[in-house]
Amino acid sequence: MGGPGSGRSGRASYESTASISLRTRSFAGIGMRFGLRCEATITYRCDGSEFPLAITIDTTDRYSPFLELDHARRTSAATRERYKVRLETTPQPFGGVRWWFRCPRTGRRAVCLRLPLGGHQFWSRHAYGLGYASQREDRRGRAQLQAQKLHAALGGGGHWMDGAPPKPKWMRWATYERKASKLDAYNDRFDAAWADGLVRLLSRAPR
């Protein structure tokens, strides 16, 4: 298998590296909140084998919430990695917050972290230099262009695959929420593979 930097385009794709993903939206959708301290092990199934991921969520300190991840590297020498991923929030117009990861490698804010074949830790797409095979397909390429325009309309200075940027000061909240939801839905099409264990993780947490 080629690692990041391989492939016909000179850039590995998300699909070709069989990336395992973590998305903030999955956590938020099943009850992510401040005041949590819980642990669980999620088992992914990749190429006929199992890949366990131990997760600790700690949001008891609202000023420094984090995930702690414990898993094997996806390399021939499958040594273990244990590290923290910082969490951040931004306020929502009608209450609540939007959750974000801080990439352990780049420090950039992201809504999705990935562990590809050959990878050591869950990092952002930018950190691994991953693209999508679909970027080289005409039909999905047109859809990608629409998503790029949508991200630009939201004042985004990063990449559309990282989700919606913070609301521009000049934009109405209703408009922002509508466009951000469309962009989230588009990203979900690419990151649909999720472990059912996430549901069990937060459902067991005390309320």
Image (cartoon, grey):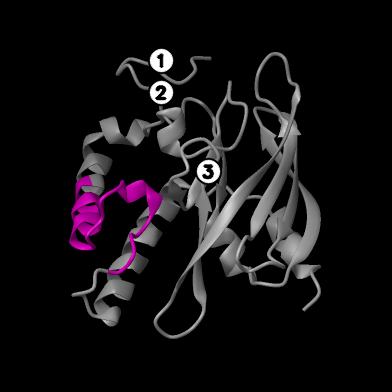
Q: Which mark is residue 12?
A: 2
User: Which secondary structure lies at badge 3?
Assistant: strand
Residue found 61% across the figure and 47% down from its top: 85
**Left or right side of 166 for 4:** right
Categorize mark 2 by other alpha carbons within 10 Å: few (<14), some (14-19), many (20+).
many
What residue is disc 3 on? 113
Image: 73 above or below 124:
above
Q: Do the residues labelled 2 and 1 touch (CB within 8 Å)?
A: yes
**Left or right side of 120 for 172:** left
Q: Do the residues labelled 3 and 2 touch (CB within 8 Å)?
A: no
Across and down, in percent, residue 185 comes to 39, 60
Q: Quadrant of residue 91?
A: bottom left
Image: 61 above or below 125:
below
Of labels 3 and 2, earlier in sequence is 2
Residue found 72% across the figure and 68% down from its top: 60
Across and down, in percent, residue 171 comes to 21, 75
Of the residues shown, which amino acid type is indicated by label 1? Answer: Ser
Categorize mark 1 by other alpha carbons within 10 Å: few (<14), some (14-19), many (20+).
some
Q: Does the stretch in magenta take in 166? A: yes
Return the residue nearer the eye: 36 or 130: 36
Return the residue nearer the eye: 158 or 25: 158
Disc nearest the viewer among 3 and 1: 3
Of the residues shown, which amino acid type is indicated by label 2? Answer: Ala
What residue is disc 1 on? 6
Q: Does the stretch in magenta take in 139? A: no
Q: Do the residues labelled 3 and 1 touch (CB within 8 Å)?
A: no
User: Which secondary structure lies at badge 1?
Assistant: loop
Residue found 35% across the figure and 21% down from its top: 11
Q: Over which residues does the magenta segment extend?
A: 145-167
Of labels 3 and 1, earlier in sequence is 1
